[in-house]
Image (cartoon, grey):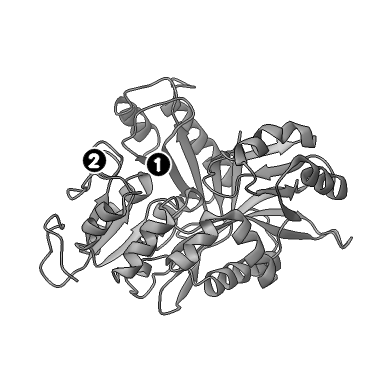
């Protein structure tokens, strides 16, 4: 493969160049483990001031929907991975035709890009899912709602994230605008799961088939955005945790996922009348994920190091938790545009707190960072994480 004239510099010692399409915070947080592993990163960035472009020296700016531009950049990479799942199929096909190693492969990535394809494949594997159907008009939506109960959850099959592209519908007529916009393309409708809490499990899988599964965590959502992660999920039955881990391994293996993947789940009371809990899979993300940020400080091997190991087919790292509990709190944009002055107060108040900010401009409700804190007192850890987030957001001032 001919290397591009715009390639990243090659480090001595035979260490590879890992290319990442997209310069968001996930690509940015790969930087520290890449340095520790002596790897070179090359970021195909959407802008010069994108989160990862601010810290990765080789971050050429381009349009990830432009196949020729991406192909030219990829000639300087030994392997390519992704900060997001939105790279078009024609771009992925062009890279595949050029023989560029990609992780996850396009054949796997499509199940994270297309929720209808995901539902059909998971159902075929026997993985527990909510009741669902592809619908193309109000009448089909009404039939599903009448069969499974109202309200229902309507989703756009592609392009949604962080609650975008998801609508809770109480009557079929309420979704007429979405069907008009879809112009005959199917939408995904699912039953509104009566869940007790939301869970997530992260798994790393290498091309040679090695897998490593982090502990199942509880995710706390506020207005469709994850605001807190508790690792491990408190009071989770060991048998249920085992079944969730098995499901994650099955999904990763059967979909041939390589790299790190998040499996987001609903825990609910089993429908068999036993009073025990079971789960259904809500979403898949074939990349490092917000629910895995706790692992950066709370596990022997964090998700970003593991992702780099996996895409290079290196032996995977130990995912054992370092402490009984780790709490991650998401920092959303608030009233402070200048965040650096808040460091001194938080570091003095709580020296064990780990603060991770993404170099993004402050906008109300935007994810701009997270904090991690680990220890033995879950209640106390939650309070410390919440205070730190509130202080960074300007909710509290002391």
Write down the quadrant of residue 232 in the picture.
bottom right
Secondary-structure class at tag 2 = loop
Q: Is residue 225 visible?
A: yes
Query: Whole-percent x and y of residue 211?
Result: 48, 73
- Pair 2/1: label in front: 2
On screen, residue 9 versus residue 217, left or right, reads: left
Query: Whole-percent x and y of residue 337?
Result: 35, 22
Q: Residue furthest front?
A: 183
Q: Quadrant of the N terminus?
A: bottom left
Query: Whole-percent x and y of residue 121?
Result: 63, 66
Q: Residue at x 45, y 45 (%)?
A: 373
Front in this rendered view, residue 148 or 141:
141
Give above or below for 160 relative to 245. Answer: above
What distance separates the C-alpha of mark 2 from that of mark 1? 24 Å
Find disc 2 in the rendering and name its residue. 54
Front in this rendered view, residue 189 or 22:
189
On screen, residue 253 versus residue 10, left or right, reads: right
How crowded pointer 2 is (Cα within 10 Å; few <14, some 14-19, many 20+) is rated as some
On screen, residue 234 versus residue 43, left or right, reads: right
Q: Residue furthest right?
A: 273
Find disc 1 in the rendering and name its residue. 353
| Badge 2 or badge 1: first in the primary sequence | 2
Q: Quadrant of the C terminus?
A: top left
Write down the quadrant of residue 393 in the picture.
top left
Write down the quadrant of residue 48 in the picture.
top left
Q: Is residue 308 visible?
A: no
């Amino acid at each position: 493969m001919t290397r591009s004239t715009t390639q990243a510099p090659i480090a001595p010692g035979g260490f590879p160049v890992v290319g990442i399409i997209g310069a968001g915070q996930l690509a940015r947080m790969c930087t520290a483990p890449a340095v520790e592993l002596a790897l070179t990163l090359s970021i195909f960035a959407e802008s010069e001031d994108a989160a990862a472009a601010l810290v990765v020296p080789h971050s050429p700016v381009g349009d990830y929907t432009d196949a020729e531009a991406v192909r030219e950049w990829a000639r300087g990479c030994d392997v390519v991975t992704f900060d997001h799942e939105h790279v078009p199929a024609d771009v992925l096909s062009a890279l595949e035709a050029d023989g560029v190693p990609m992780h996850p492969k396009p054949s796997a990535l499509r199940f994270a890009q297309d929720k209808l394809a995901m539902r059909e494949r998971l159902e075929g594997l026997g993985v527990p899912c909510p009741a669902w159907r592809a619908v193309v008009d109000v009448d089909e939506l009404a039939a599903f709602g009448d069969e499974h109960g109202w309200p229902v959850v309507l989703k756009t099959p592609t392009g949604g994230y962080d609650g975008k592209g998801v609508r809770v519908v109480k009557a079929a007529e309420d979704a007429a605008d979405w069907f008009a916009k879809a112009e005959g393309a199917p939408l995904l409708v699912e039953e509104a799961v009566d869940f007790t809490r939301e869970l997530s499990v992260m798994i790393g899988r290498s091309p040679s088939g090695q897998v490593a599964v982090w502990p199942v965590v509880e995710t706390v959502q506020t207005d469709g955005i994850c605001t807190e992660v508790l690792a491990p999920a408190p009071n989770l039955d060991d048998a249920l945790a085992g079944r969730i881990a098995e499901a994650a391994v099955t999904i990763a293996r059967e979909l041939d996922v390589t790299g790190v993947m998040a499996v987001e789940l609903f825990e609910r009371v089993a429908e068999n009348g036993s009073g025990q809990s079971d789960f259904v899979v809500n979403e898949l993300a074939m990349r490092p994920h917000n629910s895995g940020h706790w692992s950066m400080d709370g596990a022997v091997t964090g998700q970003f190091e593991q992702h780099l190991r996996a895409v290079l087919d290196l032996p995977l790292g130990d995912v054992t938790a370092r402490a009984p509990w780790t709490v991650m709190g998401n920092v959303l944009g608030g009233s402070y545009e200048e965040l650096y002055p808040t460091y001194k107060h938080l570091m003095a108040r709580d020296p064990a707190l780990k603060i991770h900010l993404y170099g993004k401009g402050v906008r109300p409700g935007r994810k701009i960072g997270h904090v991690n804190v680990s220890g033995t007192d879950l209640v106390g850890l939650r309070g410390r994480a919440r205070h730190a987030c509130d202080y960074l957001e300007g909710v509290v001032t002391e």
